[in-house]
Image (tube, rainbow, N blue to C red):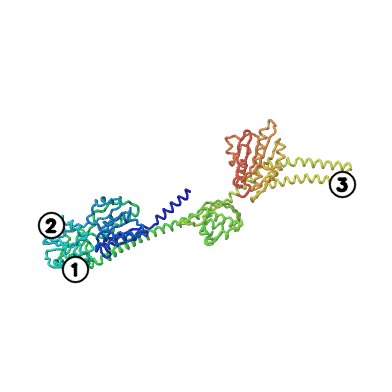
C-alpha cells in the first residue's frame, strides 16, 4: 500500500510538473494602441522561451467605452468565457485593467495572483483597502513631469509659453492631478496653458497660432470634446501637421512620429519588468515576496530630425540619452563592419601566432619523441630478454633484437605475423588463449613453455605478459617480456642428478640388502643341485624346479637394478601418476634397508580404496621421498645407536580439495629450532660428509617444478615433513 501511495504521489508530481502554466493578460485598451502592443510584444517574446507557458490576451477597449454598466457586462462575459479555464496568473495592463482586477477579483479571479503594469498615480493604500495586498504586486508607470518641465526650460531659455495638450481619460486625469503641484513652480519663468476641453479643429487653430518662443507638451489625445475618437497617431499627426514649434512628450510611442523627445516612459521596459515578475510567480515565489517596482524605468530619448529642425543642442543638459534617426557618417555606417574586421584580423593574428608557436612546440616534441624512440629502440635491443608487443588481433607490432634472434627472423619479417607463424600450434594456441583472457580482465600473466628453435635447441621460456593502453585510453594490445631459463633449468636438473648421485652410497647399500636374500637362496639351490647330482639322485623335475627357483631370484635382482636405473633417469614431462606406486617403488629400493635398521615403516592411506594421483615429475618425486626417508632412517639410527630401540617412520597420505598431502613422520628426535628454518637452503648441512643439496633440491622439485609446497615442523620428539601437491594441472 505504501509503495502504491508513493508511486501515485510521484505520478501526480510529474503530471503537475509538466502541466502548462496559463496566464491571462488583461489590457485596458485595444489592439493597435502602440503602448498596449509594445507591452504585449515584450511579454510574448519573453514567454516564447518557455514551452510550458500559454498566454491568453484580452482587450477591455476602455479608450472607447468605460462606463460601469459596460464593465459589469464585460465581467459577466469574462465569467462565461473563462469558466472552464484554470489560470495560474493574471496580468493587468494600465489603470482600467488594474481597477477592474481589484473590483472583480472575487468574482472572476478568486485566490489568483495578479501582476499589474503601466499604473499611473499608484497608491499602496488601494491594495490594503481592497484586501488585495496578498494577491497583487507589479510595476508602476510614473511619468516624470517635473524633469520634463526642467528639460524644456533648459533647452528653451527664452520660452514664452508651454502649451500642454491632454484628454480626459483616466490616465489623462491622473497626469492633470500631478501637474497641479508642478505648474506653479515655473509660472515665473514662462506661461503654462493647459488644454483638455477642446474639439480637434479649435485645438489645431490654437497650435497654428503659437509663436517661435513657444513649445508644446503633448500628453494624450484620444477623444476631443465632441466625442470624436482618435488613435494615438491620428491625433498627434493632426497637431504635428500645423505646429510651428517643437513638441515634447511623456511616452516613447510618440517618438519617431514628430516629437522632439523628453524623459519618456517605455512600454517595452514595463513589459520586461512584468515578465521577470511573472517568471518568479510561475516558479512558486509568493506574491507577498515580490515588492512593487515603484520607480518607473524612464529614459531620455530624442529624435535627431526634430532636434536639427529646431536647432536644439541637448548635449549640455543631458548626460545619458538615446538618439533615433541620427544620420550615419561613412565611419559610423561601417563602424560595425570595421570593428568586426579589426577583431577578426586580431583573432586571426593570434591564431597564426598560436599556430606558429604550436608548430615550434610540435617540432621540438617530434624531435624529442624521435630521440626517445631511438633511445627506446637501443634500450630494448640492449636488454637480453626477448621482448615483443602485438595488437588486440594478435599481430606483432614490434620486437627487440633478442626476440628476433630467438625466432631467427628479421624484424620486418616478424611485424604483421602471429605466434602461429613462429611456434608450434599447441604453444601458439595456448598463448593466444592467455592473451584473450588478459584483454578481458586487464590483468597480468606469467606462464612457461618449452620449444625447439630452428637449430633444434630446446629452450625453456617464462612469459610475463600485460595489457597496454593507447593514449586515448583504448586497449592497444599485449606486451610480453620473455625470460630464457634454459640454463637455470639445466642447472637445476644437474643438481637433481647430483643429488641422486649423492644418494648412491645409500642406494648401493639398499641394493646390497635387496640382493642378500636372493644370493643366499641361489647359493642354497646350487649346493642342493650339486649334492643331488653327486648322489646320483638328480631327476628332470629337480632340474626344472632348480631353474624356475633360480630365475625367480634372478628376476627379483634384475628388477631391483631396473628400479635403480629408473630412479637415476630424469623425468622430461609432467604427467599424472599414482602416489601409492611411487611409494611402493621407493619401498622396493630402500624397504629392506629400513627393516634391517630395526625401523618400522608404515604407509597410512586416509582415503582407502581410492587411487590418489599427483600431476608432476614422477622420478623427481621419488627422489624427494627417498631423500626424506633416508634422512629419517639415518637420524633414527644415530639417536638409537646406544639403546638399540626400535624406530618408526609413518607416511600419511590424504586427499584434500585441490591437492594431496603426504606427511613423513619420524621419531628420531626434533630439529634444533635455531636451524629448522635453514634446512632447505642450498649447501646447508649438519653432517660432516653432507653436501647440503638434498633438502634444497627437494624444495626446488616440489615448489618450483611441481607447483606444490614442502614444510617441516617439530611435534614433541617427532619431526613432520609435509608435502602438498596438486592432483590436476595448474
Q: In the figure, residue 670 lies in which quadrant?
A: top right
Q: Earlier in the sequence, mark 2 or mark 1?
A: 2
Q: Looking at the image, is mark 1 or mark 3 nearer the viewer?
A: 1
Dividing the picture into quadrants, the one containing residue 77 is bottom left
Q: Which residue is mark 3?
A: 540
Q: How dense is the environment of label 1, judged by Cα within 10 Å: few (below 14), some, or many (20 and up)?
A: some
Q: Earlier in the sequence, mark 1 or mark 3?
A: 1
**Residue 657 vertical position relative to residue 331 in the rendered view, above or below:** above
Estimate the spatial distance between the alpha carbons at disc 1 and disc 3, rounded to whole Å: 166 Å
- Which structural element holds mark 2? helix
The residue that disc 1 covers is 238
Using the rendered image of the protein, determine whether residue 616 is visible from the camera's viewpoint: no
Residue 192 in view: yes
- Closer to us: 580 or 236: 236
Q: Earlier in the sequence, mark 3 or mark 2?
A: 2
Q: Which disc number belongs to residue 397?
A: none
Kindly check if marks 3 and 2 are in contact, taking CB atoms under 8 A apart as contact.
no
User: For the residue carrying disc 2, how many other residues have a C-alpha within 10 Å: few (<14), some (14-19), or many (20+)?
Assistant: some
* Gap in angstroms between the C-alphas marked 3 and 2: 171 Å
Task: Name the residue carrying label 2.
Answer: 186
Q: Are marks 1 and 3 in contact (CB under 8 Å)?
A: no
Callout 1 secondary element: helix
- In the rendered view, does 726 fall on the left or right side of 261? right
Determine the CA span between mark 2 and mark 1: 28 Å
Amino acid at each position: 500500500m505504501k509503495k502504491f501511495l508513493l508511486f501515485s504521489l510521484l505520478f501526480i508530481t510529474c503530471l503537475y510538473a509538466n502541466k502548462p502554466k496559463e496566464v491571462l493578460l488583461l489590457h485596458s485598451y485595444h489592439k493597435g494602441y502602440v503602448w498596449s502592443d509594445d507591452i504585449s510584444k515584450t511579454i510574448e517574446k519573453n514567454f516564447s522561451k518557455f514551452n510550458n507557458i500559454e498566454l491568453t490576451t484580452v482587450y477591455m477597449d476602455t479608450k472607447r467605452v468605460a462606463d460601469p454598466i459596460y464593465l459589469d457586462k464585460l465581467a459577466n462575459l469574462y465569467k462565461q468565457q473563462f469558466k472552464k479555464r484554470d489560470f495560474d496568473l493574471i496580468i493587468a495592463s494600465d489603470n482600467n485593467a488594474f481597477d477592474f482586477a481589484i473590483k472583480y477579483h472575487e468574482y472572476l479571479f478568486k485566490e489568483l495572483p495578479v501582476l499589474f503594469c503601466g499604473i499611473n498615480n499608484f497608491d499602496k493604500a488601494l491594495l490594503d483597502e481592497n484586501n488585495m495586498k496578498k494577491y497583487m504586486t507589479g510595476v508602476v508607470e510614473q511619468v516624470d513631469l517635473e524633469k520634463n518641465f526642467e528639460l524644456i526650460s533648459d533647452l528653451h531659455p527664452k520660452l514664452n509659453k508651454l502649451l500642454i495638450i491632454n484628454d480626459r481619460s483616466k490616465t489623462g486625469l491622473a497626469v492633470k492631478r500631478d501637474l497641479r503641484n508642478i505648474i506653479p513652480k515655473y509660472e515665473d519663468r514662462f506661461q503654462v496653458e493647459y488644454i483638455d476641453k477642446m474639439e480637434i479643429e479649435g485645438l489645431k487653430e490654437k497650435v497654428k497660432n503659437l509663436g517661435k518662443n513657444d513649445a508644446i507638451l503633448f500628453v494624450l489625445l484620444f477623444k476631443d470634446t465632441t466625442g470624436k475618437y482618435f488613435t494615438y497617431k491620428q491625433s498627434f499627426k493632426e497637431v504635428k501637421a500645423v505646429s510651428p514649434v517643437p513638441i515634447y512628450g511623456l511616452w516613447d510611442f510618440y517618438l519617431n512620429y514628430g516629437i522632439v523627445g523628453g524623459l519618456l516612459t517605455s512600454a517595452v521596459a514595463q513589459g520586461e519588468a512584468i515578465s521577470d515578475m511573472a517568471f518568479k510567480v510561475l516558479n512558486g515565489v509568493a506574491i507577498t515576496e515580490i515588492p512593487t517596482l515603484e520607480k518607473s524605468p524612464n529614459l531620455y530619448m530624442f529624435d535627431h530630425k526634430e532636434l536639427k529642425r529646431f536647432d536644439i543642442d541637448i548635449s549640455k543638459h543631458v548626460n545619458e540619452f538615446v538618439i533615433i534617426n541620427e544620420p550615419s557618417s561613412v565611419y559610423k555606417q561601417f563602424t560595425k563592419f570595421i570593428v568586426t574586421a579589426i577583431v577578426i584580423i586580431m583573432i586571426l593574428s593570434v591564431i597564426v601566432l598560436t599556430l606558429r608557436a604550436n608548430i615550434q612546440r610540435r617540432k621540438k616534441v617530434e624531435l624529442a619523441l624521435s630521440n626517445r624512440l631511438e633511445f627506446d629502440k637501443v634500450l630494448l635491443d640492449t636488454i637480453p630478454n626477448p621482448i615483443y608487443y602485438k595488437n588486440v588481433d594478435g599481430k606483432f607490432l614490434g620486437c627487440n633484437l633478442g626476440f628476433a634472434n630467438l625466432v631467427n627472423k628479421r624484424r620486418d619479417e616478424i611485424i604483421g605475423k602471429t605466434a602461429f607463424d613462429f611456434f608450434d600450434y599447441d604453444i601458439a594456441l595456448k598463448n593466444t588463449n592467455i592473451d584473450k583472457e588478459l584483454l578481458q580482465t586487464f590483468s597480468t600473466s606469467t606462464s612457461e613453455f618449452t620449444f625447439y628453435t630452428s637449430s633444434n635447441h630446446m629452450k625453456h621460456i617464462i612469459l610475463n605478459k600485460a595489457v597496454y593502453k593507447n593514449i586515448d585510453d583504448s586497449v592497444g594490445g599485449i606486451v610480453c617480456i620473455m625470460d630464457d631459463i634454459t640454463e637455470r633449468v639445466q642447472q637445476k636438473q644437474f643438481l637433481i642428478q647430483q643429488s641422486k648421485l649423492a644418494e648412491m652410497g645409500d642406494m648401493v647399500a639398499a641394493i646390497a640388502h635387496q640382493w642378500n636374500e636372493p644370493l643366499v637362496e641361489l647359493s642354497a639351490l646350487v649346493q642342493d643341485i650339486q649334492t643331488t647330482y653327486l648322489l646320483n639322485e638328480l631327476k628332470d623335475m629337480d632340474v626344472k624346479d632348480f631353474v624356475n627357483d633360480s630365475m625367480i631370484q634372478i628376476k627379483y635382482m634384475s628388477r631391483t637394478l631396473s628400479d635403480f636405473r629408473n630412479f637415476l633417469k630424469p623425468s622430461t614431462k609432467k604427467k599424472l601418476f599414482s602416489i601409492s606406486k611411487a611409494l611402493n617403488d621407493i619401498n622396493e629400493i630402500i624397504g629392506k634397508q629400513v627393516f634391517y635398521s630395526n625401523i618400522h615403516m608404515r604407509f597410512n592411506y586416509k582415503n582407502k580404496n581410492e587411487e590418489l594421483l599427483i600431476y608432476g615429475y614422477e622420478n623427481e618425486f621419488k627422489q624427494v621421498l627417498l631423500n626424506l626417508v633416508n634422512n629419517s632412517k639415518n637420524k633414527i639410527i644415530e639417536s638409537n645407536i646406544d639403546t638399540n630401540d626400535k624406530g618408526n617412520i609413518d607416511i600419511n597420505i590424504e586427499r584434500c580439495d585441490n591437492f594431496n598431502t603426504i606427511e613423513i613422520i619420524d621419531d628420531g628426535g626434533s630439529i634444533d629450532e635455531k636451524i629448522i628454518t635453514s634446512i632447505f637452503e642450498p649447501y646447508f648441512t649438519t653432517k660432516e660428509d653432507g653436501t647440503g643439496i638434498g633438502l634444497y633440491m627437494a624444495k626446488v622439485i616440489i615448489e618450483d617444478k611441481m607447483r606444490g609446497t614442502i614444510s617441516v615442523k617439530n611435534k614433541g620428539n617427532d619431526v613432520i615433513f609435509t608435502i602438498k601437491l596438486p592432483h590436476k594441472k595448474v
